[in-house]
Amino acid sequence: MVTVFQIALGSGLWVGGMAIDRTDLQVPVLAGGCLAAVGVAAMRACRTPMPDETPMQNSQVEP
């Protein structure tokens, strides 16, 4: 797991460095923001409530 994480991290740094060298600094920042927004939207779209998930009627715990 650690090796895969380090390879992914290094690859992302390498690709980001190449993108900054070939374009302005704004392009990778905008691309990262767009990817983050897509990720959040995908997580929200795929979320399903648990079968026993119900809103709490009373937040106080009875003794």
Image (cartoon, helix red, strand yellow):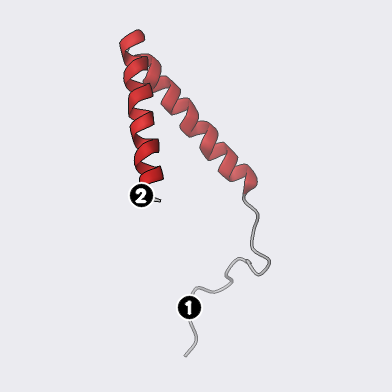
- Which residue is depicted at the point 42% across and 27% down? 32
Decide if residue 25 is in sight here.
Answer: no
Q: Position of residue 1 (x, y in %)?
A: 41, 51
Q: Position of residue 4 (x, y in %)?
A: 41, 44
Residue 60: mark in rendering: 1
Q: Hey, which residue is sitting farthest bottom in the picture? A: 63
Residue 3: mark in rendering: none
- Which residue is depicted at the point 38% across and 22% down? 15
The tag earlier along the polypeptide, 2 or 1, is 2
Going by the image, does 16 lie left or right of 40?
left
Mark 1 nearby-residue class (10 Å; few <14, some 14–19, many ≥20)? few
Q: Nearer the viewer, residue 6 or 49?
A: 6
Q: Position of residue 12 (x, y in %)?
A: 38, 30
Q: Nearer the viewer, residue 59 or 53?
A: 53
Callout in the foreground (2, 1): 2
Amino acid residing under circle 1: Gln
Q: Which residue is mark 2?
A: 2
> What count of labels does the image hold?
2
Decide if residue 2 is in sight here.
Answer: yes
Label 2 secondary element = helix
42, above or below 26, in the image: below
Amino acid residing under circle 2: Val
Q: Hey, which residue is sitting farthest front in the picture? A: 3
